[in-house]
Amino acid sequence: MESHSKVDAPVADYQPRPRVLVVEDETNVAEVVERYLRRDGVDTTVVHDGQSALDYLSSDGVDLVVLDVMLPVMDGLEVTRRMRAQNDATPVIMLTARDTESDVVLGLGLGADDYVGKPFSPAELMARVHAVLRRGTRASSPGPVIRAGALVISSEYRTVELNGTSIELTAKEFDLLFFLASNPGRVYSREQLLNHVWDYSHPGDTSTVTVHIRRLRAKIEEDASRPRHVKTVWGVGYKFDA
């Protein structure tokens, strides 16, 4: 009698569902965001004030926080500041109804990865959410050290030095600088930078690029009003001059 050995079927790699914490005190807005996230296969938890957000994050980890700026008990800017002070590097997308750019600049400076202004398109928010989640799943690998005059950029250690002094950049500021410095002389529009650096191809607000460029210059340029490295090509975009 011929014997047959049983061959086990290959087991597919298990991919855990991404987890997102939504911090929003407007019930109708929170319900819309939660519905779209769950529709896209994202496990979603909703809380309605800043302190509850910090309490949740201290006991359970998530892949992303969608965080309103205007919150009771503790606003979104303070939540972000405390997260980063506690070395919590969880990505943050801020929702803001404020028109003043200073709030956006402050949020990004505290370590937020992106922001979406209210009222917003759910499709635009979902595109930004998935762009951040995709970046989080990519394995990092050692890369080159880029030297441009007194500026030294290490991809492997994600550090920047200017004249031998360490420069503190947010995660997105570093990503933007490293991308431009890796392609010296090439001009990129704001839309192209959103696509390459933010991994976000949905047409929408490009002002986050402008704000990040301004903050980057303030940190790495000896004279931000006359930048030596991160230059504007008027009517087109930006380039890195080594």
Image (cartoon, rainbow, N blue to C red):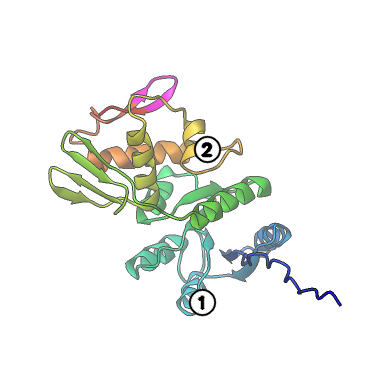
Q: Residue at x 63, y 65 (%)?
A: 13
Q: Identify which amino acid the numbered label 2 is placed on.
A: Asn
- Residue 65 at x, y = what percent? 52, 62
Query: Which range is magenta?
Result: 232-238
Residue 3 showing in the rendered view: yes
Q: Residue at x 70, y 58 (%)?
A: 32
Of 137 and 50, the residue lying toward us? 137
Count neighbours of disc 2 (C-alpha within 10 A) and say few if under 14, some if 14 to 19, many if 20 or more.
some
Residue 95 showing in the rendered view: no
Label at residue 60: 1
Residue 220 vertical position relative to residue 18 in the rendered view, above or below: above
Helix, strand or loop at mark 1: loop
- Residue 162 at x, y = what percent? 17, 43
Q: Mark 2 vs mark 1: which is more N-terminal?
A: 1
Of 211 and 186, the residue lying toward us? 186
Tag 2–tag 1 contact (CB < 8 Å): no
Count neighbours of disc 1 (C-alpha within 10 A) and say few if under 14, some if 14 to 19, many if 20 or more.
few
Q: Quadrant of the C terminus?
A: top left
Residue 206 vertical position relative to residue 141 in the rendered view, above or below: above
Residue receiving disc 2 = 195
Horizontal side of 2 relative to 112 (left or right) equals: right
Q: Is residue 239 magenta?
A: no
- Residue 94 at x, y = what percent? 50, 55
Of 51 and 132, the residue lying toward us? 132
